[in-house]
Image (cartoon, rainbow, N blue to C red):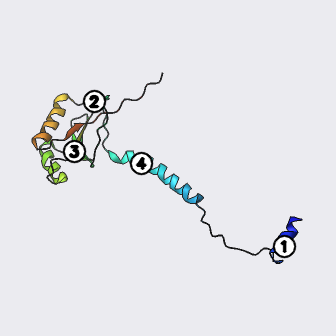
């Protein structure tokens, strides 16, 4: 009965195609969620390329306003600036080139737990003797214990 009423309103023309004027956003949302997940997984992998075993600390994270320069000291005592190896004698000159002689740039020093205290002190003293004052040590944040 209702079908008969609809036929009269359309003038007896059945199956006439009308274009849909709406955008289907479901595929767009699906693609965006997949991209979000991919970037969330790959972003932490990009930040540091040198693998070191960081010590744990209960300190709060430091807020940074610019991209910091990262120096890593591996267990064997080798020093890396960002992802490239550098000699300790050339560290200050390389830092000045990267920082463009801006001694206010924040520098993060990452050291393996097996690195002797004297080696870490020597690296930090070299950096501060070069005029850089914003030097910080990085440590792993403690994981929450299950009760």
Mark sitting earlier along the chain (2/4): 4
- Front: mark 3 or 1: 1
Count neighbours of disc 4 (C-alpha within 10 A) and say few if under 14, some if 14 to 19, many if 20 or more: few
Q: CA distance from mark 4 to mark 1?
A: 57 Å
Q: Position of residue 69 (x, y in %)?
A: 24, 46
Q: Residue at x 80, y 75 (%)?
A: 10
Q: Residue furthest right?
A: 1
Q: Position of residue 54 (x, y in %)?
A: 30, 33
Q: Which residue is mark 2?
A: 113
Q: Which residue is mark 4?
A: 42
Q: Residue at x 83, y 70 (%)?
A: 6
- Is residue 138 shown above or below 81? above
Q: Residue furthest top?
A: 147
- Front: mark 4 or 1: 1
- Front: mark 2 or 3: 3
Q: CA distance from mark 3 to mark 1?
A: 75 Å
Q: CA distance from mark 2 to mark 3?
A: 22 Å
Q: Which residue is mark 1?
A: 7
Quadrant where the N terminus is found in the figure: bottom right
Q: Secondary structure at mark 1?
A: helix
Q: Position of residue 81 (x, y in %)?
A: 22, 46
Mark sitting earlier along the chain (2/3): 3
- Front: mark 2 or 1: 1
């Amino acid at each position: 009965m209702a079908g008969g009423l609809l036929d009269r309103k359309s003038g007896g023309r059945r199956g006439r195609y009308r274009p849909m004027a709406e955008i289907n956003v479901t595929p767009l949302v699906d693609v965006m969620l997949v991209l979000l997940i991919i970037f969330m997984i790959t972003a932490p992998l990009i930040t540091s390329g040198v693998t070191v075993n960081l010590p744990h600390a209960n300190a709060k994270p430091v807020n940074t306003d610019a991209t910091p320069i990262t120096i890593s000291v591996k267990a064997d005592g080798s020093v890396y600036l960002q992802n490239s190896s550098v000699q300790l004698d050339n560290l200050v000159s390389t830092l000045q080139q990267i920082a463009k002689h801006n001694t206010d740039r924040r520098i993060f020093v990452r050291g393996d737990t097996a690195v002797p205290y004297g080696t870490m002190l020597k690296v930090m003293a070299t950096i501060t003797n070069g005029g850089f004052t914003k030097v910080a040590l990085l440590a792993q944040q403690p994981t929450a214990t299950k009760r």
